[in-house]
Amino acid sequence: MNLLRRHPIALVLIALVLGSALRPLPPLVDAGSGLPPAEVDLVRPTLYTLLAPVSDVLDALTFLSGERAVTFLLIWVPTLALWGLLRPGSPRRRLVAAVLAPLAVILLGVAAVLVPRPVPRLVAADSTLTVIDYHAHTALSHDGRRGWTLADLAAWHAAQGFGASYVTDHNVVFNGGVDDPIRLLPGVEWSVYDQHVIALGAVAPVERSTYGRDTRAMLSLFGALHRQGAIGIASLPEYWRNHWGDLDEFVAAGADGFEIVNCAPKAIGFPAAARAQVLRLARSHDLLVVGASDNHGWGKVTCVWNLSSPSAHGYRSNRVIARPIALAQGQWPPWTAAYTQPWLMLAGLSWSERSSWLTWILVILIYRAVPRRVGDPPGIGILARSLSLKILRLRPPSPPPPPLPPTD
């Protein structure tokens, strides 16, 4: 009971890490069927697992939808500030804690976007399948990260198991020509009348004003892409937020498919019920459904991969494989993010990650729980008990006293 009173946070974390294993989430889910895919695996690098508490927290922050990210901060920042003010200690110590604790949350969010780190990699057992991304950007997009080159984009994808990616900068045509470390394919993302249309394949520039007058003009872009030998995909979140009542018109106009998962904060919250409706529409008309990282150089990890099969066409030619925590963004109201996002993170841990979490918690708990003896060097804690002071302080042993002279 004394341990619980003195270290409640560590013991609660242990209980949550173990308790979340009772109803675990699979590492990956087929966004079409809702079932874990049998033919792929999510491989976590050794360093990722060793640093699992940091790796998993940064991933969980990356996969927050825009609305949930705002409420996450609005709840956790003042809560941690209040905790800092109310904890025991001197006024100065409490004020420092009230500032540093909320700042830590903000800095973790920045780290999730900018700091290089190991990331999980998708591995497919079937070598005939191509792991592909249908929607990604470079610095040529107006909202792309400055200096984010084709080489950076290719390396980002290769690290996560992709074998190819379309480059779909905003209104800037990419004609291909990159094959290492993965193949970058030609494409573009046209912005026309409250809708983004992903054009896949070699295309020529179009006069966007022709397709920007109204919904009917926008839909005629699909026919124009067909005449160029390209295919057109309706991007999220635009058709969801701006053209939800026009989906049948998209099909009639010749849309080749729809994004059903998009990792961008503005699109990752696509509701499961809406995704199911689009899947039914695509299945009935044999249309392509795809997932999109929508990478702009911000963030180090993807929430989705595609398994493209060269032997199939239409709806059956592609499977969308996603992280469950990403799909869940549309299932929980934004105001729940402060507790549902940590729970989703813990429920998705592998047993190796859980072991890493428990090890780190116990090491810190032991370090903080065992009192130091008077005279122990600061910062050593329990280690001072097991190391000899001779080694610890790097002091040579004292020489024996000289013998006493003989007496008469």
Image (cartoon, rainbow, N blue to C red):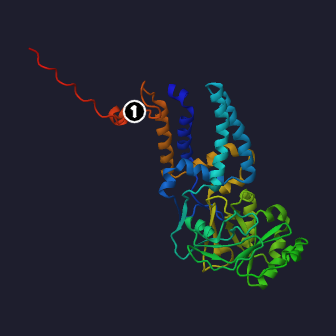
* Residue lying at the far right of the rendered structure: 213
320 or 44, nearer to the observer:
44
273 or 259, nearer to the observer:
259
- Quadrant location of residue 280? bottom right
* Residue lying at the far top of the rendered structure: 408
374 or 175, nearer to the observer:
374
Residue 349 position (above or below residue 242): above
Residue 370 position (above or below residue 166): above
- In the rendered image, residue 1, in percent from the top left (x then y), is placed at 51, 25
Q: Residue placed at 63% from the left, 61% from the top?
A: 302
- Quadrant location of residue 139? bottom right
- In the rendered image, residue 394, in percent from the top left (x then y), is placed at 35, 36
Q: Residue placed at 81% from the left, 81% from the top?
A: 223
Residue 153 position (above or below residue 348): below
42 relative position to 140: left or right? left
Residue 39 can be seen in this image: no
Q: Which residue type does callout 1 highlight?
A: Ala
Residue 147 can be seen in this image: yes
Residue 44 position (above or below residue 383): below
24 or 322, nearer to the observer:
322
Which residue is label 1 attached to? 384
231 relative position to 388: left or right? right
Quarter of the image that includes the C terminus = top left
- In the rendered image, residue 273, in percent from the top left (x then y), is placed at 74, 58
Q: Residue placed at 50% from the left, 53% from the top?
A: 49
